Amino acid sequence: MEAVDPVRAVQKYLRREDNRLVVGEKTYDLKKYDGVYIIGAGKASAAMAQPVEDLLGDLLEAGLVNVKYGHSRPLRHISINEAGHPVPDEASLRGTERILQLLRQTGERDLVLFLISGGGSALLAGPAEGLTLEDLQRVTQRLLESGATIHEINAIRKHISRVKGGQLARLAHPSSLVSLILSDVIGDNLDSIASGPTVPDSSTFKDCLDILEKYGLADKIPEAVLNHLKKGARGDIKETPKPGDPVFEKTQNVIIGSNIQAVEAARIKAEALGYNSLILSTFVQGETREIAKMHAAIAREVLAHGHPVPRPACLVSGGETTVTIRGRGLGGRNQEFALAAAIEIDGLEDVVVLSGGTDGTDGPTDAAGAIADGTTVRRAKALGLDAGHYLQENDSYHFFQPLGDLLITGPTLTNVMDLRVILVS
């Protein structure tokens, strides 16, 4: 977690030299700007704002960041608005409207710094014309339950919003716009992080209709949303800004942290502890239960044949899986991973599995994930808990809670997807 600390990440890519602001490889002459504005959205945006405030506090005209409830930090010059995640709420809309009001004050001689991290899709919420908050909530919930990938979910989020998919850059134009981005998506695709508010959008209205058809959602979402997407596909509604659009001429997007940094830090620490460590992948995606089976199979391979590394082994992976909701239980993708893995490694000695969300929250729970080993299923049976039943009901939280094996960290104030660790001693 220290490797993806948002304060350190900002300090690495942002520095001030008298009247010059250096962002990555680009330098801005602060004397050329009438005002500097700070906006942000995401679970880590308040933590990211701290070093920015320390650096530019004397120049700030105004600032506001939208964060998930419980993810605030004390700030002197920048206001904080707490709001809902992963489903937007009224506070999300109010905070987004306040950000848009700030942007309306800016002009060609202003500099806007935008702090983006995971969770920004829900926290930066402005429904497209003719749509409501309830429409956004229902669509988001349906998509989260469908098993759709984050890229697919965000494609639809962009096209029912007035700020996502490069549209915030359109609203900020002609100001100079700098986005500092903490990535929480596979491959660090800029147009997917927080639904890409400041980058060209590669998806289209037609893509959105194809996604709805793929997951059988066309008749499960609000009619107003479906009609909106159909109008866009016909060309009756303006598309999101695409590559080459002049609204991006004065925009700089910089990724300051990502999943590989957390995974690599875990690998290095494992080596220091005496493990033969190996990164499996940071591009892991797919149905959580299937990914858990694959990881358990690799643990068995280490036990049986010493491949891909001999014991003592530490296997690390990153990325983000998905859960297709079929039951009525409580949990998240990391807890479900640990439960599915527990079933697969039942009875094995010397194997332990951890799966956790780097933001400290897994699904709609207070846990970041869970830990399992070869005794988990047996210990659960002694308490009258059937692992298979709890997996079927997507109720991993209530499976691990009585065992004392939930991973509870509280908000970490960063967010770079998930981290999975398998130890074979």
Image: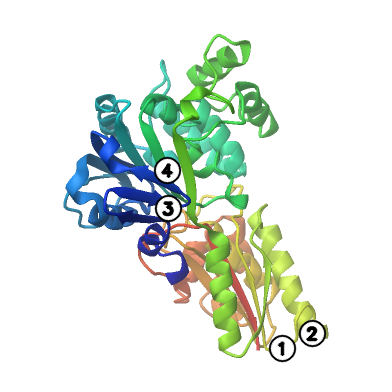
Q: Amino acid at mark 3?
A: Pro
Q: Are marks 4 and 3 in contact (CB under 8 Å)?
A: no
Q: Which residue is mark 1?
A: 311
User: What residue is disc 4 on?
Assistant: 179
Q: Which is nearer the N-term, disc 2 or disc 3? A: 2
Q: Are marks 1 and 2 in contact (CB under 8 Å)?
A: yes
As drawn, the label of residue 194 is none
Name the spot of residue 14 as percent of width and height, x first. Answer: 38, 55
Question: Is 191 situated left or right of 290 in this image?
Answer: left
Q: Are marks 1 and 3 in contact (CB under 8 Å)?
A: no
Q: Amino acid at mark 4?
A: Ser
Disc 4 crowd rating (10 Å Cα; few below 14, some 14-19, many 20+) is many
Label 3 secondary element = loop
Mark 3 is surrounded, within 10 Å at the Cα level, by few (under 14), some (14 to 19) or many (20 or more) other residues, namely few
Q: Which residue is mark 3?
A: 364
| Quarter in which the C terminus is drawn | bottom right
Counting residues from the start of the chain, the first of labels 4 and 1 encountered is 4
Real-space Cα distance between discs 1 and 3?
A: 36 Å
**Sequence-wise, which precedes: disc 1 or disc 2?**
2
Q: CA distance from mark 2 to mark 3?
A: 38 Å
Q: Position of residue 325 (x, y in %)?
A: 58, 47
Q: For this rendering, which residue is in front, 226 or 179?
A: 179
Q: Does residue 315 appear left or right of residue 123 in this picture?
A: right
Sequence-wise, which precedes: disc 4 or disc 2?
Answer: 4
Q: CA distance from mark 4 to mark 3?
A: 28 Å
From the image, state whether disc 4 or disc 3 is nearer to you: 4
Q: Position of residue 126 (x, y in %)?
A: 38, 28
Q: Which of the labelled discs sits on residue 306, or is there none?
A: 2
| CA gap, disc 1 and disc 2 | 6 Å
Position of residue 191 relative to residue 318, above or below, is above
